[in-house]
Amino acid sequence: METFIIAIENEKGGSGKTNTAIGLACGLKAAGYDVVVIDNDPQGGSMRWKRNSSSDNFPPVVLLGKNLEKTDTELYKASFLIIDGEPGIEANEQLKKLVRFMRRLSDDTSLPSSVRREINQGLREIIGSSLEITVSTVSAIKLSDLVIVPMKGSDQDVEPSMNLIDNLLKPRFEATGKPIYKALINEVPYSGNTINDGKSLQAQLRLQLTVKNIPVFNTTIHTRQQYREANTYGHTVFDEKASYEKCRVEMENLTMEVLETLGVKLNG
Ligand SMILES: Nc1ncnc2c1ncn2[C@@H]1O[C@H](COP(=O)(O)OP(=O)(O)O)[C@@H](O)[C@H]1O
Ligand SMILES: [Mg+2]
């Protein structure tokens, strides 16, 4: 079987990249595929989750560019590489603001020259690192067969989540036919008396995406505290535990849709 590369990307931190990357990777592993997660976020959310875990359901996780020697056999035989993306573009916007502020300070002749030298040094380091972030997100997208963009269904302001689609994914797909991209609605409130709010928020978001011609998974990942719990305790939602059942079903549905999207026939 060929190797498929799936990148989970959204410039917004906390949009559900790591939750999706691990959930999907476990779903593919449970379906019998060899999977490796590549953690491309400098904060290393997937790696931390894995290190904290003793679950047999957890696939290998490698940091991009690091410790490959330990896992290279897994990497070479993997049918799916799942890239847990970095919160790049949003971070860049914040960095740009910081850089502008620091430039103003370093131009301020009323400050002692030793302080201004120090600020200049900091500026050089920040500019270097922010360039790296942008390049790595773009490279991940160029490598991928499928890019999944999780967006918060509970969020009124989804515009920042559209940046990546409008500015990178859509134009690239139109120009080269690759990669396929799909939005994933994550964290829709779904409990107690917020159920109606959740439904209408989800409907609004789906409509917004449809109007903009953005493909979206039918599977919705609801807000369930068990997702947070699994992350905290190093579990996977595929672990034997009755309270994880609903999360597991959501991740199984997402897995099936991903296989369908990539045109992969189910194993066995
Ligand atoms: N559907 C969900 N329901 C409940 N909590 C969630 C859900 N998706 C993500 N979370 C929690 O929200 C936080 C941020 O999610 P995460 O996947 O780490 O986002 P990102 O990787 O994009 O920064 C984590 O604590 C995670 O456990
Ligand atoms: Mg993360």
Image (tube, helix red, strand yellow):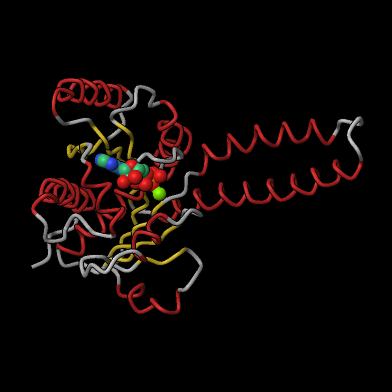
Q: Describe residue 38's horizontal placement relative to residue 88 as left or right.
A: left
User: Residue 196's spot in the image, x, y percent?
Assistant: 15, 21
Give the residue at x 47% y 39%.
168
Between 218 and 70, the one lying in front of the other is: 70
Q: Is residue 177 visible?
A: no
Which quarter holds ligand 1?
top left
Give the residue at x 13% y 27%.
192
Give the residue at x 30% y 70%.
78
Question: What quarter of the picture does the C terminus occupy?
Answer: bottom left
Q: Describe residue 4's horizontal placement relative to residue 87 as left or right.
A: left
Question: What quarter of the picture does the N terminus occupy?
Answer: bottom left
Give the residue at x 38% y 27%.
158
User: Residue 237's spot in the image, x, y percent?
Assistant: 19, 54
Q: Is residue 195 above or below residue 50?
A: above
Between 151 and 233, the one lying in front of the other is: 233
Q: Is residue 46 visible?
A: yes
